[in-house]
Image: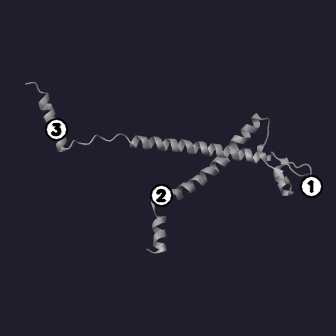
Amino acid sequence: MSFIKEFKEFATKGNVMDLAVGVIIGGAFGKIVTSLVDNILMPVIGIFTGGVNFTDKFILLNESKGTHFDSLATAKTAGAPVFAYGAFIQSVIDFLIIAFCIFLLVKFMNSLTKKQEAAPAPAEPTAQEKLLMEIRDELKKPR
């Protein structure tokens, strides 16, 4: 079997195609969750924390490029070393939401699988078993 033919068979298997579709959908879902966190959740959390904008939360690690920056973007533009803990908090929230959604999806898929794995109907008795049952029934009859 040639290398190209073997690769073609591998690439067209159902599992590989399913994985490719899953990665593409996962990437798109990640963008949706990031937008949800950045544009909806974090502003609401900011309101409850006194108007804090988490995207601009950072700690200046070295004052060689300046001592005060209005935002994380200006600090990065100036080349100042920063510890951007606000962006990290947003990434953690992104991860938790995605992990929770994947958990729900896996739980749902497992419940579907369990329903499909319902106990199969008992097999029909063989001819020998039927004969033995008839003999048993005859022996039980009163004489």
The foreground one among 41 and 27 is: 27
| Mark 1: few/some/many CA within 10 Å (<14, 14-19, 20+) | few
- The circle drawn on residue 64 is 1
Work out how far the residue at label 3 is from the one at label 2, CA to CA, in angstroms: 48 Å
What is the x, y in percent for residue 30? 62, 50
In the displayed structure image, the side of residue 25 where residue 115 appears, left or right = left
In this figure, which colouring scheme has been used for the structure?
A: one colour
Determine the CA span between mark 1 and mark 2: 53 Å
Q: Amino acid at mark 1?
A: Ser
The residue sitting at the bottom extreme is 2
Q: Is residue 119 above or below residue 12?
A: above
How far separated are the C-alphas under marks 1 and 3? Answer: 95 Å
Can residue 9 be seen here?
yes
Q: At label 2, which amino acid type do we have?
A: Asn
- Of callouts 1 and 3, which one flags the residue occurring earlier in the amino acid sequence? 1
Q: Residues within 10 Å of mark 3 (few under 14, many from 20)?
A: few
Which residue is tagged 2? 15
Which amino acid is tagged 3?
Leu
Secondary structure of the residue carrying tag 3 is helix
Residue name at image x 39 percent, y 43 percent: 116
Label drawn at residue 132: 3
Mark sitting earlier along the chain (1/2): 2
Q: Where does the C terminus fall, quadrant-wise?
A: top left
Element under disc 1: helix
- Drawn side of residue 7 relative to residue 56, left or right: left
Is 94 or 107 nearer to us in this picture? 107
For the view shown, which residue lies furthest in the top direction?
A: 142
